[in-house]
Image (tube, rainbow, N blue to C red):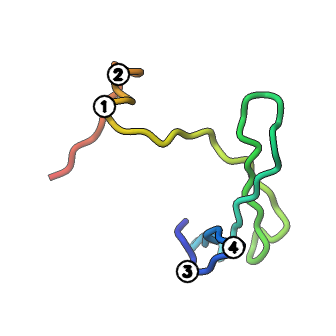
């Protein structure tokens, strides 16, 4: 999945090359269970009309992450 080059309401539209589906992130508000309330909605392609719940994520730096998760590892490439 990658950015399609399109935007909608200042949000990047994502494109799934395998299914040729277009996906738009949608915020549905506080879910009450600690999750972000974010969904991906497909409006075109093989998955048109489907919704997927987004996985929880963090924007952080490695220094902050490894301080909170000292057993973390990463893969280094040449």
- The dot on residue 63 is 1
Q: Gap in Å between the C-alphas at discs 1 and 4?
A: 36 Å
Of 4 and 49, the residue lying toward us: 4
Spot occupied by residue 9 in the image (x, y as percentages of width and height): 71, 72
Q: Quadrant of residue 33?
A: top right
Q: Residue at the left extreme?
A: 78
The tally of labels here is: 4
User: Mark 2 near mark 3, Cβ–Cβ under 8 Å?
Assistant: no
- The dot on residue 29 is none
- The dot on residue 67 is 2
Q: Gap in Å between the C-alphas at discs 2 and 4?
A: 38 Å
Crowding around mark 1 (Cα neighbors within 10 Å: few <14, some 14 to 19, many 20+) is few
Element type at mark 3:
strand
Spot occupied by residue 70 in the image (x, y as percentages of width and height): 34, 19
User: Mark 2 near mark 4, Cβ–Cβ under 8 Å?
Assistant: no
65 vs 20: above or below: above
Q: Quadrant of residue 72?
A: top left
In the picture, measured across the screen, residue 11 lies left or right of residue 29, that is left
Q: Gap in Å between the C-alphas at discs 1 and 3?
A: 32 Å
Q: Quadrant of residue 21?
A: bottom right
Element type at mark 2:
helix
Tell me which label, 2 or 4, sits earlier in the chain: 4
The residue carrying mark 3 is: 5
Q: Nearer the viewer, mark 1 or mark 4?
A: 1
Element type at mark 1:
helix
In the picture, measured across the screen, residue 20 lies left or right of residue 29, that is left
The residue carrying mark 4 is: 21
Q: Nearer the viewer, mark 1 or mark 3?
A: 1
Q: Residue at the bottom extreme?
A: 6
Tell me which label, 2 or 3, sits earlier in the chain: 3
């Amino acid at each position: 999945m990658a950015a399609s080059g399109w935007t909608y309401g200042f949000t990047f539209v994502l494109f799934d090359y395998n299914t040729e589906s277009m996906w738009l992130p949608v915020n549905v508000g506080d879910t009450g269970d600690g999750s972000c309330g974010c969904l991906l909605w497909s409006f075109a392609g093989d998955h048109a009309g489907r919704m997927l719940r987004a996985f929880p994520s963090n924007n952080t730096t490695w220094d902050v992450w490894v301080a909170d998760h000292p057993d973390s590892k990463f893969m280094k490439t040449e």
